[in-house]
Amino acid sequence: MNENYVFIFEFVSGGGFNQVDIPSSLFCEGFGMLRSIIADFKAMDFIISTILDYRIYFLSNLLEADIIHKVDAKDNYINIFKNQVRNCKYIFIIAPESSNILYELTEIAKNYKRIILSVDLEGIKLGTSKIMTYSFFKRNKINTPKTYLIPLRNKKFDLEFIIQKFKELKRPIIIKPEDGVGAESIYYFGSENQIREFFHSLDNSFEYNRTYILQEFIDGRDLSISLIGSSSNLNSQIATPIFLSINSQDVEITNLKIKSEYFGGYTPVEDQKEILNYLSKILNKINLSKFSGYYGIDFIQKKNKTVHFLEINPRLTTSYIGLRNVIDINPVELIINSKLNSMKPVKLKYHSHSNFSRIELIYTGSKSINEIKESLFPKLLNMISELVTPPISFNKSKFFSCFLATKTKDLSSSKNRLNAILSTLEQFDFKVLKSRLVK
Protein backbone atom coordinates (compact mmCIF):
# COMPACT_ATOMS: atom_id res chain seq x y z
CA MET A 1 0.00 0.00 0.00
CA ASN A 2 1.33 3.42 -0.99
CA GLU A 3 1.04 6.10 1.70
CA ASN A 4 0.33 9.11 -0.53
CA TYR A 5 -1.82 7.32 -3.08
CA VAL A 6 -5.52 8.07 -3.47
CA PHE A 7 -7.87 5.98 -5.58
CA ILE A 8 -10.69 8.12 -6.98
CA PHE A 9 -13.59 6.17 -8.45
CA GLU A 10 -16.60 7.48 -10.38
CA PHE A 11 -19.23 4.85 -11.09
CA VAL A 12 -20.59 5.87 -14.52
CA SER A 13 -17.25 6.54 -16.21
CA GLY A 14 -15.37 3.96 -14.14
CA GLY A 15 -16.98 0.78 -15.42
CA GLY A 16 -20.33 0.67 -13.64
CA PHE A 17 -22.05 0.50 -17.04
CA ASN A 18 -19.34 -1.47 -18.86
CA GLN A 19 -21.75 -4.23 -19.94
CA VAL A 20 -24.69 -1.99 -20.90
CA ASP A 21 -25.25 1.33 -22.66
CA ILE A 22 -23.90 4.37 -20.83
CA PRO A 23 -26.55 7.09 -20.30
CA SER A 24 -24.87 10.16 -21.81
CA SER A 25 -26.51 12.61 -19.41
CA LEU A 26 -25.27 10.70 -16.35
CA PHE A 27 -21.85 10.28 -17.92
CA CYS A 28 -21.47 14.02 -18.53
CA GLU A 29 -22.05 14.81 -14.87
CA GLY A 30 -20.02 11.85 -13.59
CA PHE A 31 -16.97 12.51 -15.75
CA GLY A 32 -17.20 16.22 -14.95
CA MET A 33 -17.08 15.47 -11.22
CA LEU A 34 -14.25 12.96 -11.71
CA ARG A 35 -12.14 15.38 -13.74
CA SER A 36 -12.74 18.21 -11.27
CA ILE A 37 -11.98 16.29 -8.08
CA ILE A 38 -8.88 14.67 -9.60
CA ALA A 39 -7.51 18.11 -10.49
CA ASP A 40 -8.11 19.32 -6.93
CA PHE A 41 -6.47 16.27 -5.35
CA LYS A 42 -3.51 16.72 -7.71
CA ALA A 43 -3.12 20.29 -6.50
CA MET A 44 -2.72 18.80 -2.99
CA ASP A 45 0.23 16.66 -4.20
CA PHE A 46 -1.51 13.28 -4.12
CA ILE A 47 -0.55 10.43 -6.43
CA ILE A 48 -3.84 9.52 -8.08
CA SER A 49 -5.20 6.35 -9.64
CA THR A 50 -8.57 5.87 -11.29
CA ILE A 51 -10.31 3.54 -13.74
CA LEU A 52 -12.17 4.32 -16.98
CA ASP A 53 -14.70 2.49 -19.13
CA TYR A 54 -13.13 1.32 -22.41
CA ARG A 55 -15.58 3.43 -24.45
CA ILE A 56 -14.35 6.68 -22.96
CA TYR A 57 -10.72 5.73 -22.37
CA PHE A 58 -9.77 8.17 -25.14
CA LEU A 59 -10.61 10.94 -22.65
CA SER A 60 -7.90 9.76 -20.24
CA ASN A 61 -5.58 12.55 -21.35
CA LEU A 62 -8.05 15.05 -19.81
CA LEU A 63 -7.51 13.60 -16.33
CA GLU A 64 -4.57 14.63 -14.15
CA ALA A 65 -4.34 11.09 -12.78
CA ASP A 66 -1.01 9.26 -12.53
CA ILE A 67 -2.45 5.77 -13.08
CA ILE A 68 -5.52 5.02 -15.22
CA HIS A 69 -6.74 1.45 -15.68
CA LYS A 70 -9.14 0.51 -18.45
CA VAL A 71 -12.32 -1.49 -17.79
CA ASP A 72 -13.20 -3.63 -20.83
CA ALA A 73 -16.66 -4.93 -21.74
CA LYS A 74 -16.07 -8.40 -20.28
CA ASP A 75 -14.35 -7.22 -17.11
CA ASN A 76 -15.88 -7.34 -13.66
CA TYR A 77 -15.32 -3.73 -12.63
CA ILE A 78 -15.63 -4.70 -8.95
CA ASN A 79 -12.48 -6.82 -9.20
CA ILE A 80 -10.57 -3.92 -10.74
CA PHE A 81 -12.02 -1.63 -8.08
CA LYS A 82 -10.77 -3.95 -5.33
CA ASN A 83 -7.29 -4.12 -6.84
CA GLN A 84 -7.03 -0.35 -6.77
CA VAL A 85 -8.34 -0.18 -3.22
CA ARG A 86 -5.61 -2.62 -2.11
CA ASN A 87 -2.89 -0.36 -3.48
CA CYS A 88 -3.99 2.97 -2.02
CA LYS A 89 -4.22 4.39 1.48
CA TYR A 90 -6.98 6.87 0.65
CA ILE A 91 -10.22 6.23 -1.24
CA PHE A 92 -12.72 8.70 -2.69
CA ILE A 93 -15.91 7.25 -4.19
CA ILE A 94 -18.49 8.97 -6.40
CA ALA A 95 -21.47 6.69 -7.06
CA PRO A 96 -25.27 6.72 -6.95
CA GLU A 97 -27.08 5.73 -3.78
CA SER A 98 -29.63 3.73 -5.79
CA SER A 99 -29.49 -0.08 -5.62
CA ASN A 100 -27.14 0.35 -2.63
CA ILE A 101 -24.20 0.92 -5.00
CA LEU A 102 -22.50 3.70 -3.03
CA TYR A 103 -22.89 1.83 0.26
CA GLU A 104 -21.50 -1.46 -1.07
CA LEU A 105 -18.47 0.15 -2.74
CA THR A 106 -17.68 2.10 0.41
CA GLU A 107 -18.08 -1.05 2.48
CA ILE A 108 -15.48 -2.81 0.31
CA ALA A 109 -13.00 -0.02 0.99
CA LYS A 110 -13.82 -0.14 4.73
CA ASN A 111 -13.23 -3.88 4.80
CA TYR A 112 -9.73 -3.25 3.45
CA LYS A 113 -9.29 -0.76 6.30
CA ARG A 114 -8.64 2.15 3.97
CA ILE A 115 -9.21 5.82 4.83
CA ILE A 116 -12.48 6.90 3.20
CA LEU A 117 -12.34 10.53 2.08
CA SER A 118 -15.91 10.50 0.75
CA VAL A 119 -18.93 10.13 3.08
CA ASP A 120 -18.76 7.06 5.33
CA LEU A 121 -21.28 4.23 5.75
CA GLU A 122 -23.49 5.81 8.43
CA GLY A 123 -24.11 8.92 6.37
CA ILE A 124 -24.67 6.92 3.19
CA LYS A 125 -27.23 4.70 4.94
CA LEU A 126 -29.24 7.69 6.17
CA GLY A 127 -28.98 9.74 2.98
CA THR A 128 -29.82 6.84 0.67
CA SER A 129 -33.25 6.32 2.21
CA LYS A 130 -35.67 9.17 1.61
CA ILE A 131 -37.97 7.80 4.30
CA MET A 132 -35.15 7.70 6.84
CA THR A 133 -34.14 11.22 5.81
CA TYR A 134 -37.75 12.38 6.20
CA SER A 135 -37.87 10.89 9.70
CA PHE A 136 -34.53 12.54 10.52
CA PHE A 137 -35.86 15.95 9.48
CA LYS A 138 -39.11 15.43 11.40
CA ARG A 139 -37.27 14.38 14.58
CA ASN A 140 -35.26 17.59 14.34
CA LYS A 141 -38.44 19.66 13.77
CA ILE A 142 -37.33 20.80 10.32
CA ASN A 143 -39.80 21.76 7.61
CA THR A 144 -39.99 18.92 5.10
CA PRO A 145 -42.68 17.73 2.66
CA LYS A 146 -45.00 15.03 4.00
CA THR A 147 -43.69 11.73 2.67
CA TYR A 148 -45.14 8.21 2.55
CA LEU A 149 -43.95 4.81 1.38
CA ILE A 150 -46.30 3.51 -1.33
CA PRO A 151 -47.54 0.01 -0.40
CA LEU A 152 -47.99 -2.78 -2.92
CA ARG A 153 -51.24 -4.57 -3.70
CA ASN A 154 -51.12 -7.62 -5.98
CA LYS A 155 -47.48 -6.77 -6.79
CA LYS A 156 -48.46 -3.30 -8.04
CA PHE A 157 -48.61 0.04 -6.31
CA ASP A 158 -51.75 0.58 -4.26
CA LEU A 159 -53.58 3.13 -6.38
CA GLU A 160 -56.29 3.76 -3.79
CA PHE A 161 -53.66 4.57 -1.16
CA ILE A 162 -52.13 7.11 -3.56
CA ILE A 163 -55.54 8.68 -4.29
CA GLN A 164 -56.35 8.80 -0.57
CA LYS A 165 -53.11 10.62 0.27
CA PHE A 166 -53.58 12.99 -2.67
CA LYS A 167 -57.00 13.97 -1.33
CA GLU A 168 -55.69 14.35 2.23
CA LEU A 169 -52.83 16.60 1.13
CA LYS A 170 -55.10 18.72 -1.10
CA ARG A 171 -52.17 19.67 -3.30
CA PRO A 172 -50.08 18.20 -6.16
CA ILE A 173 -47.88 15.24 -5.33
CA ILE A 174 -44.55 13.81 -6.46
CA ILE A 175 -43.87 10.09 -6.83
CA LYS A 176 -40.24 8.96 -7.02
CA PRO A 177 -37.92 6.07 -6.05
CA GLU A 178 -37.14 5.83 -2.35
CA ASP A 179 -33.43 5.58 -3.18
CA GLY A 180 -33.50 7.72 -6.33
CA VAL A 181 -30.74 10.11 -7.41
CA GLY A 182 -31.16 13.62 -8.80
CA ALA A 183 -34.20 13.94 -11.07
CA GLU A 184 -34.36 10.21 -11.77
CA SER A 185 -37.90 8.88 -12.38
CA ILE A 186 -39.75 11.75 -10.69
CA TYR A 187 -43.44 12.02 -11.58
CA TYR A 188 -45.67 15.04 -10.87
CA PHE A 189 -49.45 14.72 -10.50
CA GLY A 190 -51.76 17.69 -10.20
CA SER A 191 -55.13 15.93 -10.32
CA GLU A 192 -56.80 12.64 -9.46
CA ASN A 193 -57.54 12.07 -13.14
CA GLN A 194 -53.83 12.37 -13.97
CA ILE A 195 -52.99 9.76 -11.34
CA ARG A 196 -55.64 7.28 -12.50
CA GLU A 197 -54.80 7.79 -16.18
CA PHE A 198 -51.10 7.24 -15.56
CA PHE A 199 -51.53 4.11 -13.45
CA HIS A 200 -54.01 2.57 -15.84
CA SER A 201 -51.76 3.12 -18.84
CA LEU A 202 -49.71 0.18 -20.07
CA ASP A 203 -46.54 2.18 -20.58
CA ASN A 204 -45.90 3.75 -17.16
CA SER A 205 -42.26 3.49 -16.26
CA PHE A 206 -42.31 2.27 -12.67
CA GLU A 207 -39.84 -0.43 -11.71
CA TYR A 208 -41.94 -2.60 -9.40
CA ASN A 209 -38.88 -4.20 -7.84
CA ARG A 210 -38.01 -0.81 -6.30
CA THR A 211 -39.64 1.02 -3.42
CA TYR A 212 -41.31 4.32 -4.25
CA ILE A 213 -42.49 7.22 -2.11
CA LEU A 214 -45.30 9.73 -2.39
CA GLN A 215 -44.43 13.27 -1.39
CA GLU A 216 -46.39 16.49 -1.27
CA PHE A 217 -45.24 18.95 -3.91
CA ILE A 218 -43.76 22.19 -2.55
CA ASP A 219 -43.73 25.02 -5.06
CA GLY A 220 -40.67 27.27 -4.94
CA ARG A 221 -37.00 27.65 -5.89
CA ASP A 222 -35.02 24.44 -6.29
CA LEU A 223 -31.83 25.00 -4.29
CA SER A 224 -29.09 23.04 -2.60
CA ILE A 225 -26.41 23.72 -0.04
CA SER A 226 -22.92 22.23 -0.33
CA LEU A 227 -21.26 21.41 2.98
CA ILE A 228 -18.15 19.94 4.52
CA GLY A 229 -19.00 17.93 7.61
CA SER A 230 -16.82 16.62 10.41
CA SER A 231 -17.42 13.56 12.55
CA SER A 232 -15.97 15.35 15.59
CA ASN A 233 -15.55 18.86 16.89
CA LEU A 234 -13.38 19.69 19.88
CA ASN A 235 -15.36 22.82 20.76
CA SER A 236 -18.87 21.42 20.58
CA GLN A 237 -20.85 18.26 21.12
CA ILE A 238 -22.50 18.88 17.77
CA ALA A 239 -20.16 18.78 14.78
CA THR A 240 -20.79 22.05 12.95
CA PRO A 241 -20.36 21.75 9.17
CA ILE A 242 -18.67 24.29 6.94
CA PHE A 243 -21.23 25.91 4.64
CA LEU A 244 -19.66 26.17 1.19
CA SER A 245 -22.30 27.59 -1.14
CA ILE A 246 -25.97 27.87 -2.00
CA ASN A 247 -26.61 26.53 -5.49
CA SER A 248 -29.52 27.01 -7.85
CA GLN A 249 -30.77 23.74 -9.38
CA ASP A 250 -32.38 23.47 -12.78
CA VAL A 251 -34.76 20.53 -12.50
CA GLU A 252 -37.65 19.70 -14.83
CA ILE A 253 -40.27 17.47 -13.24
CA THR A 254 -43.67 19.08 -13.69
CA ASN A 255 -44.97 17.54 -16.91
CA LEU A 256 -45.93 13.89 -17.29
CA LYS A 257 -45.18 14.07 -21.01
CA ILE A 258 -41.62 15.20 -20.40
CA LYS A 259 -39.03 12.95 -18.75
CA SER A 260 -37.79 14.38 -15.45
CA GLU A 261 -34.28 15.76 -15.87
CA TYR A 262 -31.55 17.60 -14.02
CA PHE A 263 -29.66 20.06 -16.21
CA GLY A 264 -27.24 21.75 -13.80
CA GLY A 265 -27.43 25.05 -12.01
CA TYR A 266 -25.38 28.01 -10.91
CA THR A 267 -23.51 29.11 -7.82
CA PRO A 268 -23.56 31.17 -5.71
CA VAL A 269 -27.16 32.41 -5.83
CA GLU A 270 -27.69 36.16 -5.64
CA ASP A 271 -29.13 36.10 -2.11
CA GLN A 272 -26.68 33.52 -0.75
CA LYS A 273 -25.74 35.49 2.39
CA GLU A 274 -29.38 35.83 3.44
CA ILE A 275 -30.10 32.13 2.86
CA LEU A 276 -26.91 30.99 4.62
CA ASN A 277 -27.85 33.04 7.69
CA TYR A 278 -31.29 31.44 7.67
CA LEU A 279 -30.00 27.87 7.22
CA SER A 280 -27.17 28.17 9.73
CA LYS A 281 -29.67 28.84 12.52
CA ILE A 282 -31.37 25.54 11.64
CA LEU A 283 -28.48 23.26 10.71
CA ASN A 284 -26.16 24.28 13.56
CA LYS A 285 -28.68 22.82 16.02
CA ILE A 286 -28.74 19.41 14.32
CA ASN A 287 -26.33 16.55 14.81
CA LEU A 288 -24.99 15.99 11.28
CA SER A 289 -21.90 14.11 12.45
CA LYS A 290 -22.79 11.08 10.31
CA PHE A 291 -21.91 13.19 7.30
CA SER A 292 -18.17 13.84 7.32
CA GLY A 293 -16.53 15.19 4.19
CA TYR A 294 -18.38 16.75 1.27
CA TYR A 295 -22.16 16.33 0.98
CA GLY A 296 -25.20 18.30 -0.11
CA ILE A 297 -28.73 19.01 1.06
CA ASP A 298 -31.53 19.76 -1.42
CA PHE A 299 -34.26 22.16 -0.36
CA ILE A 300 -37.10 24.30 -1.66
CA GLN A 301 -37.40 27.99 -0.83
CA LYS A 302 -40.99 29.19 -1.00
CA LYS A 303 -42.01 32.70 -2.03
CA ASN A 304 -42.38 33.67 1.63
CA LYS A 305 -38.67 32.71 2.08
CA THR A 306 -39.40 29.69 4.29
CA VAL A 307 -37.42 26.56 3.49
CA HIS A 308 -38.49 22.92 3.13
CA PHE A 309 -35.70 20.34 3.23
CA LEU A 310 -36.01 17.51 0.68
CA GLU A 311 -33.07 15.14 0.96
CA ILE A 312 -29.43 14.71 1.93
CA ASN A 313 -26.97 13.65 -0.78
CA PRO A 314 -24.19 11.64 0.94
CA ARG A 315 -21.65 12.09 -1.85
CA LEU A 316 -19.99 14.54 -4.17
CA THR A 317 -22.73 16.38 -6.08
CA THR A 318 -22.69 17.96 -9.52
CA SER A 319 -22.65 21.41 -7.88
CA TYR A 320 -19.00 20.72 -7.00
CA ILE A 321 -18.06 21.36 -10.63
CA GLY A 322 -19.22 24.96 -10.26
CA LEU A 323 -18.37 25.45 -6.58
CA ARG A 324 -14.65 24.87 -7.08
CA ASN A 325 -14.63 27.79 -9.54
CA VAL A 326 -16.00 30.35 -7.12
CA ILE A 327 -14.34 29.93 -3.69
CA ASP A 328 -10.84 30.99 -2.67
CA ILE A 329 -9.71 27.63 -1.24
CA ASN A 330 -9.30 24.17 -2.72
CA PRO A 331 -12.35 22.19 -1.46
CA VAL A 332 -10.20 19.04 -1.25
CA GLU A 333 -8.13 20.70 1.48
CA LEU A 334 -11.31 21.06 3.52
CA ILE A 335 -12.36 17.48 2.76
CA ILE A 336 -9.02 16.11 3.95
CA ASN A 337 -9.07 18.24 7.10
CA SER A 338 -12.58 17.07 7.92
CA LYS A 339 -11.59 13.42 7.56
CA LEU A 340 -8.38 13.69 9.55
CA ASN A 341 -10.10 15.56 12.42
CA SER A 342 -8.18 18.78 11.85
CA MET A 343 -11.06 20.87 10.53
CA LYS A 344 -11.08 24.49 11.63
CA PRO A 345 -13.60 27.26 10.95
CA VAL A 346 -12.90 29.04 7.67
CA LYS A 347 -14.19 32.27 6.21
CA LEU A 348 -14.67 31.69 2.52
CA LYS A 349 -14.47 34.40 -0.11
CA TYR A 350 -16.41 34.16 -3.35
CA HIS A 351 -14.38 35.62 -6.18
CA SER A 352 -16.38 34.33 -9.14
CA HIS A 353 -19.69 33.00 -10.40
CA SER A 354 -20.20 29.66 -12.13
CA ASN A 355 -22.99 28.41 -14.34
CA PHE A 356 -22.65 24.62 -14.69
CA SER A 357 -24.84 23.05 -17.31
CA ARG A 358 -25.42 19.93 -19.36
CA ILE A 359 -26.02 20.76 -23.01
CA GLU A 360 -27.67 18.38 -25.48
CA LEU A 361 -26.47 18.67 -29.10
CA ILE A 362 -26.92 17.11 -32.51
CA TYR A 363 -24.03 17.03 -34.95
CA THR A 364 -25.12 18.17 -38.42
CA GLY A 365 -21.73 18.02 -40.14
CA SER A 366 -20.15 15.37 -42.32
CA LYS A 367 -17.39 14.07 -40.06
CA SER A 368 -17.52 10.55 -38.65
CA ILE A 369 -17.50 9.86 -34.91
CA ASN A 370 -13.79 8.98 -35.08
CA GLU A 371 -13.01 12.15 -37.02
CA ILE A 372 -14.89 14.19 -34.44
CA LYS A 373 -12.83 12.60 -31.65
CA GLU A 374 -9.51 13.03 -33.44
CA SER A 375 -9.87 16.44 -35.08
CA LEU A 376 -12.75 18.38 -33.51
CA PHE A 377 -12.22 17.55 -29.84
CA PRO A 378 -8.73 19.08 -29.59
CA LYS A 379 -9.95 22.28 -31.28
CA LEU A 380 -13.02 22.56 -29.07
CA LEU A 381 -11.08 21.93 -25.87
CA ASN A 382 -8.51 24.52 -26.90
CA MET A 383 -11.16 27.13 -27.69
CA ILE A 384 -13.57 26.37 -24.82
CA SER A 385 -11.78 25.92 -21.51
CA GLU A 386 -15.17 25.60 -19.80
CA LEU A 387 -15.81 22.20 -21.42
CA VAL A 388 -15.51 19.94 -18.37
CA THR A 389 -16.91 17.04 -20.39
CA PRO A 390 -16.52 17.47 -24.16
CA PRO A 391 -19.38 16.49 -26.50
CA ILE A 392 -19.80 12.75 -26.13
CA SER A 393 -21.87 10.29 -28.14
CA PHE A 394 -22.41 6.60 -27.56
CA ASN A 395 -23.54 3.94 -30.04
CA LYS A 396 -22.21 6.00 -32.97
CA SER A 397 -25.12 8.39 -32.68
CA LYS A 398 -25.20 11.95 -33.99
CA PHE A 399 -26.67 13.06 -30.66
CA PHE A 400 -24.12 14.42 -28.19
CA SER A 401 -24.07 15.60 -24.58
CA CYS A 402 -21.48 17.84 -22.95
CA PHE A 403 -21.04 19.61 -19.63
CA LEU A 404 -19.84 23.19 -19.16
CA ALA A 405 -18.82 25.22 -16.12
CA THR A 406 -18.17 28.94 -16.44
CA LYS A 407 -16.03 31.14 -14.24
CA THR A 408 -17.12 34.76 -14.50
CA LYS A 409 -17.80 37.74 -12.29
CA ASP A 410 -21.60 37.36 -12.03
CA LEU A 411 -24.71 35.54 -13.30
CA SER A 412 -25.20 37.87 -16.25
CA SER A 413 -21.60 37.36 -17.39
CA SER A 414 -22.02 33.59 -17.08
CA LYS A 415 -25.07 33.62 -19.32
CA ASN A 416 -23.25 35.78 -21.85
CA ARG A 417 -20.29 33.41 -21.83
CA LEU A 418 -22.53 30.35 -22.24
CA ASN A 419 -24.20 31.94 -25.24
CA ALA A 420 -20.78 32.63 -26.76
CA ILE A 421 -19.80 29.00 -26.16
CA LEU A 422 -22.94 27.74 -27.87
CA SER A 423 -22.16 29.96 -30.85
CA THR A 424 -18.69 28.39 -31.04
CA LEU A 425 -20.20 24.89 -30.93
CA GLU A 426 -22.53 25.82 -33.76
CA GLN A 427 -19.53 26.90 -35.84
CA PHE A 428 -18.39 23.28 -35.60
CA ASP A 429 -21.79 22.00 -36.77
CA PHE A 430 -23.19 21.20 -33.33
CA LYS A 431 -26.81 22.33 -33.10
CA VAL A 432 -28.17 22.92 -29.61
CA LEU A 433 -31.17 20.77 -28.69
CA LYS A 434 -31.46 21.45 -24.95
CA SER A 435 -29.89 24.22 -22.95
CA ARG A 436 -32.16 25.25 -20.11
CA LEU A 437 -29.89 27.78 -18.45
CA VAL A 438 -29.23 30.10 -21.37
CA LYS A 439 -32.00 32.62 -21.88
Image (spheres, grey):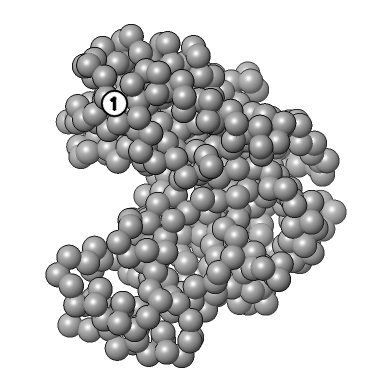
Res 406 seen here: no
Q: Quadrant of residue 283?
A: bottom right
Q: Secondary structure at mark 1?
A: strand
Q: In the image, residue 196 lies at what x, y percent?
A: 26, 81
Q: Quadrant of residue 432?
A: top left
**Vertical side of 173 occupied by 241: above or below:** above
Please state if 65 lies on the left or on the right of 391 as rendered.
right
Q: Quadrant of residue 142?
A: bottom right
Task: Return the residue nearer the eye: 322 or 36.
Answer: 322
Q: In the image, residue 163 lies at what x, y percent?
A: 34, 86
Q: Which residue is mark 1?
A: 363
Please state if 352 lies on the left or on the right of 259 as rendered.
right
Q: Residue at x 64, y 42 (%)?
A: 267
Please state if 271 lies on the left or on the right of 46 as rendered.
right
Please state if 420 lies on the left or on the right of 343 as rendered.
left
Q: Residue furthest left?
A: 202
Q: In the image, residue 141 lies at what x, y percent?
A: 67, 77
Q: In the image, residue 232 lies at what x, y percent?
A: 72, 52
Task: Return the residue nearer the eye: 114 or 96.
Answer: 96
Q: Amino acid at mark 1?
A: Tyr
Res 18 seen here: yes
Q: Residue at x 59, y 20 (%)?
A: 42
**Count of labels shown?**
1
Q: Residue at x 50, y 25 (%)?
A: 421
